[in-house]
Image (cartoon, helix red, strand yellow):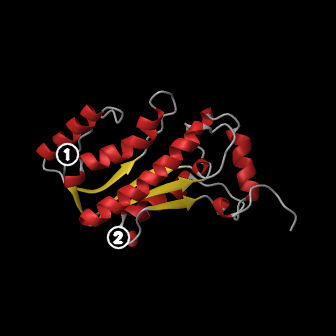
Amino acid sequence: MNPQKIFLCDVGDDDSIAAQAEELRKLEVKLDFVAHSVAYAEDPNLLVHSVYSFGSVIRSVKDLLTPRASTITLTFPGSQLAYPGYNIMGVAKSAFEAEVRYLGRELGAWNKTRVNAISAGPVRTLASRGVKGFVLFRQSVRETNMLGEDTSQMDVACEALCLLSDLSLHVTGQIRYVDCGNSAVWPGNLPE
């Protein structure tokens, strides 16, 4: 049985990221995947935590990534559409999605490491409870998406597993929508 180890890392601090990467090197760890899931919406560190941290973390462990490794992160459709109240986070997510594409190009050429993001519909989580108007937003999306259902945490987990597995060996630099088809329909109700 392999012992498990937990590392604490402040992804807004380059020294903390470098220290954790060095600790992994000392343990002679090789990484088949990296999953990045960070949410931070307070100024002045918004861009550092929401955009920069993904590339910083991945680049710090670049030499530890096995060939054809996979990296994933999370985004939100507010990067493409102006969602009420999302404001500067939408701008940050747009930059974040560009980082996915550029990092995908860099790591794909380096050792065929894949870089992708999952853009989920409104998922009921502890964090979403703090979003003003979330319940009405989720209901509206359910009423207008292609399946007439809610996106679940399990839906996002299944997509993550697919992207981390060999089932997606040639998928990189992509934003994968897991939103019951919401991103592909006109927002709001129109008569048929």
Image quadrant in which the C terminus is located: bottom right
The residue that label 2 is drawn on is: 166
Q: Earlier in the sequence, mark 2 or mark 1?
A: 1
Q: Secondary structure at mark 2?
A: helix
Residue 44 vertical placement versus 53 (above, below): above
The residue that label 1 is drawn on is: 3
* Image quarter of residue 24: top left
Residue at 54% across / 51% down in the picture?
A: 153
Q: Is residue 144 visible?
A: yes
Q: Dot 2: within a 10 Å radius of its alpha carbon, few (fewer than 14), some, or many (20 or more) residues? A: few
Q: Identity of the amino acid at label 2?
A: Asp
Q: Secondary structure at mark 1?
A: loop
Residue at 35% across / 70% down in the picture?
A: 166
Is residue 162 rendered to the left or right of residue 146? left
- The spot of residue 49 in percent (x, y) is 42, 36
- Front position among marks 2 and 1: 2
Q: Dot 1: within a 10 Å radius of its alpha carbon, few (fewer than 14), some, or many (20 or more) residues? A: few
